[in-house]
Image: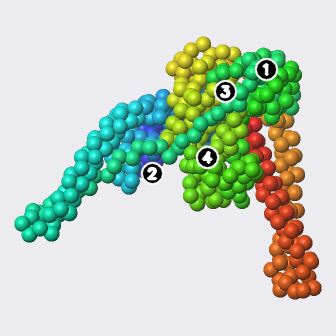
Amino acid sequence: GVDAHESGQRIAELHDRFDAIDGYSARARAAALLSGLGFAAERHDDPVASFSGGWRMRLNLARALMCRSDLLLLDEPTNHLDLDAVLWLEDWLGRYPGTLLLVTHDRDFLDAVVGEIVHLDNGTLRLYTGNYAQFERERAQALALQQAAYIKQQRQIAHLRSFIDRFRAKATKAKQAQSRIKTLERMESIAAAHVDSPFSFELRSTEIGARQLLKLDHADLGYDGVPVLADVNWPILAGARIGLLGHNGAGKSTLLRAIAGELRPMRGGRLTANGLRIGYFAQHQMEQLRLDESALWHFQRLEPGAREQELRNYLGGFDFRGDRVSAMVREFSGGEKARLTLALLARQRPNLLLLDEPTNHLDIEMREALTEALQDYTGALIVVAHDRHLLRATADELWLAADGNLSPFDGDLDDYRQWVLEERSAQVARAQKPRNVAAIDRKAQRREEAQERQRLASLRKPYEQELAQLEKELAELASEKQTLDDWLASPDAYVDETRQRLKETLTRQGDLTWRLARAEAAWLQLQTTLEQLDGH
């Protein structure tokens, strides 16, 4: 009887504890988080291994948000999110009851969710009250005051030194000179206010006479017979400045690939004007950089006749200076690779610029420099970005990819935010419905899920086959190179009798090294493409 009583009491305590931590609502809260971050309801029970790297980053973020916490630490949470997910996260964090410590380069996101800014500059921390816009104003005022104080102090120093130099040797003035020397020594130095951006570049366009640069003519766009966007009838005119909206998987990247000529329409056509020069930036293009070469090498290959100093000056505008110009790309951060890719793109002077999430990995100063360059760019621009500051500053019209169609969006980004939150609320409501509700046709749902898995499998198949072939090629190249390396490491390679063989082996080794690097870059690009397909 006593044991039963104690067990019952313990069970009651556990139930109370479970209730206190909202354990009964855990599944509903998890479904709301996953739907908010863009996971389709039918994939909520899928194993983690079935998701690509980008989606796993979202799962990590969802796990952090799921924890009941007093302090939430987020380091660049928007980097792997599309605009829809950023807007939802912004709304969620606005209702978070605990303390939030956030690192991000998204100024609109900061404006919406924070009330204080901690600025780290030259090894010191300074706290500003307000959001990022208020921080910018206060910092500008502080820098102006600092610069004025610096100029005033420099005048005082010049005056004191002039007096010391004139009267130090005169006996009648020696005492006064010594007093001024002590004043100079006690003076606390005020640093000059440095606010100059390390970036200075332009995006120039090649002249083109045509009014219509390109047209997708009743085009169906997709993969392996499965359209993502249907009957796209879209002329792109000279001077157009378009922002593309839509949730992850709606077809924005697919559309840009088709415009760039990387994806052939399944039906319909793609018409281009004479003299059209397209510049296309997407995340996977950073993987095409030669890791074993320098930033300077990439430009020397692009322009063999250009003077080295001229190329160095150009790279300096993207903050590649000194030894960094000659450093191997494998040493670069994600931000440096993105800047190098943008620098190569800008050098080609395109008259139609396609940008797919160009601000990923870029800090606020580079984002601002890119925004200013895009504002001055005279060519046509189509941009996909989760950075609303860049979108507002550079796009004159918005188009929406949704439900397999492309159409003009009637409204601004604030209207789009409201639309997204309403859509996500509806998704959450659907995801939270009890599984035994009779209205849900489980048979139809399973059929849809099977069709979706089949569609994704068909999309991935050709890329997976190419990936397998590449992996086989990489293994063969690596094996042959290892054999050559082993021979070159032996003393027999350096005797007179093997001189010719040594020469041939070194040539072959260099060729294998280059082919390995190219195959590895292709392998990385295919992996990125597979991840992107998971979102489409």
Whole-number angstrom distance, CA of label 2 to CA of label 1: 79 Å
Tag in front: 4 or 3: 4
Q: Amino acid at mark 3?
A: Gly
* C-alpha distance separating marks 1 and 3: 16 Å
Q: Is label 1 in contact with label 3 (beta carbons under 8 Å)?
A: no
Q: How many marks?
A: 4
Residue at 63% in and 53% down: 309
- Residue 435 in sight here: no
Residue type at the position of mark 1: Lys
Residue named by callout 2: 3
Mark 4 is on which residue type? Tyr
The tag on residue 314 is 4
Q: Earlier in the sequence, mark 1 or mark 3?
A: 1
Q: Nearer the viewer, residue 85 or 258?
A: 258
What x and y, as percent, mark residue 393? 53, 26
Q: Nearer the viewer, residue 490 or 110?
A: 490
Q: CA distance from mark 1 to mark 4?
A: 33 Å
Name the residue rendered at 21%, 58% in the picture: 162
> Which residue is rendered at x = 72% and y = 52% of the image?
300
For mark 3, give the secondary structure.
loop
Query: Which residue does the numbered mark 3 point to in the structure image?
Result: 379
How many residues crowd mark 2 within 10 Å: few (<14), some (14–19), many (20+)?
A: few
Pointer 1 residue: 215
Residue 333 percent across, percent down from the top left = 59, 52
Q: Is residue 380 above or below residue 364?
A: above
- Which tag is nearer the camera, tag 2 or tag 1? 1
- View extreme (left): residue: 172
Q: Residue at x 28, y 46 (%)?
A: 151
